[in-house]
Image (cartoon, helix red, strand yellow):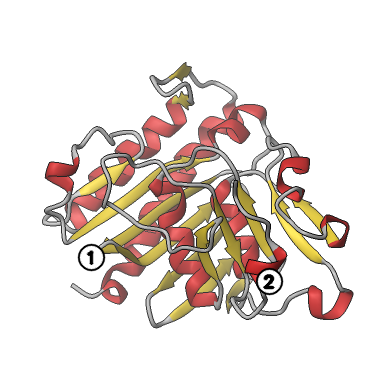
Amino acid sequence: MKPEAIIEQAIEIAIEAGNAIRKIYQSGDFKREIKSDNTPVTSADLAAHDIICSRLAKLTPDIPILSEEDADIPLSVRQNWSKYWLVDPLDGTGEFIAGSGDFSVIIALVEHNRPIMGIVYAPMTEVCYYAIAGLGAYKRSPEGEVRITSTQLALSEQNHLRIAVSRRQDPKKVLKLFNHPKDCELVVLGGAALKSCLVAEGQADCYIRLGPTGEWDTGAAQIIVEEAGGALVDINLHPMTYNERDTLENPNFIVVGTENLPWNVMLLNDE
């Protein structure tokens, strides 16, 4: 089954999960726990997980699902998957708890260790970013749908880089990665996928993420950014990999709007 044949159904699943999250968020009535990896999980994460997994299982019963909330699957099993769904039911749980509204639903389809379709849906704005390999990246909102591109950089016009960073990250650590930090402007936003999509639509030039993330945080964002003209790579500019290691934890990474700038000169070594 080609991704273009199921993209609309997958978007509907993301929206359904997002609606459930929004309802819980607006009610303010949710349970919070700390998982074994010391990260938070809420009843909204679990509700979205249940919706997405049950709906995807009906849509594509032969494709396995790897969700952040059900990720205890050994590599010995996963390595036999030629294609699978990679899901973060609620990206930005910390933002959900803090009440910022900057969180999203993430659904990616991975084939042969590369994302080939991705959806990032923001429930509070009803904005959906999506992409299919070879068919471009798009932003769908209540105002309509547009094809997005990441390659219009502020550097060429204003002589500085716009760097998307998390509210929960020390910006000094990010700026230390650049040879000329005074030439950088920080764009603050919650949720890893939303910041990547900010780069994909040309509203930021790059996004640096230091610290732990899972493969489910980057799968959909990677194909969206790539189809918009950018790249999602590790800090040393090596390609990200999926379902090839025992751990599902990502290395530190950078999302860039274009590969045509000398990032290897602009960035310091990761050490």
- Residue occupied by mark 2: 202
Q: Position of residue 93 (x, y in %)?
A: 53, 33
Q: Nearer the viewer, residue 222 or 261?
A: 261
Mark 2 in CB contact with mark 1 (< 8 angstroms): no
How packed mark 1 is, by other alpha carbons closer than 10 Å (few <14, some 14-19, many 20 or more), is: some
How much space separates mark 2 and mark 1, taking CA atoms? 29 Å
Q: Residue at x 23, y 48 (%)?
A: 65
Residue 180 is left or right of residue 144, and the answer is: right
Mark 2 and mark 1 lie on one chain; the one further toward the N terminus is 1
Tell me residue 148's x, y (percent).
59, 76
Could you tell me if residue 88 is visible in this image? Answer: yes
Percent across and percent down for residue 170 are 73, 37
Viewer-closest of 264 and 254:
264
Q: Which mark is residue 83?
A: none
Specify the amino acid type for callout 2: Gly
Q: Taking 249 as reference, is 154 left or right? A: right
Q: Is residue 244 above or below residue 206?
A: above
Name the residue carrying label 1: 112
Measured from the top left, where is residue 173 in percent x and y?
Answer: 72, 41
Q: Residues within 10 Å of mark 2 (few under 14, many from 20)?
A: many
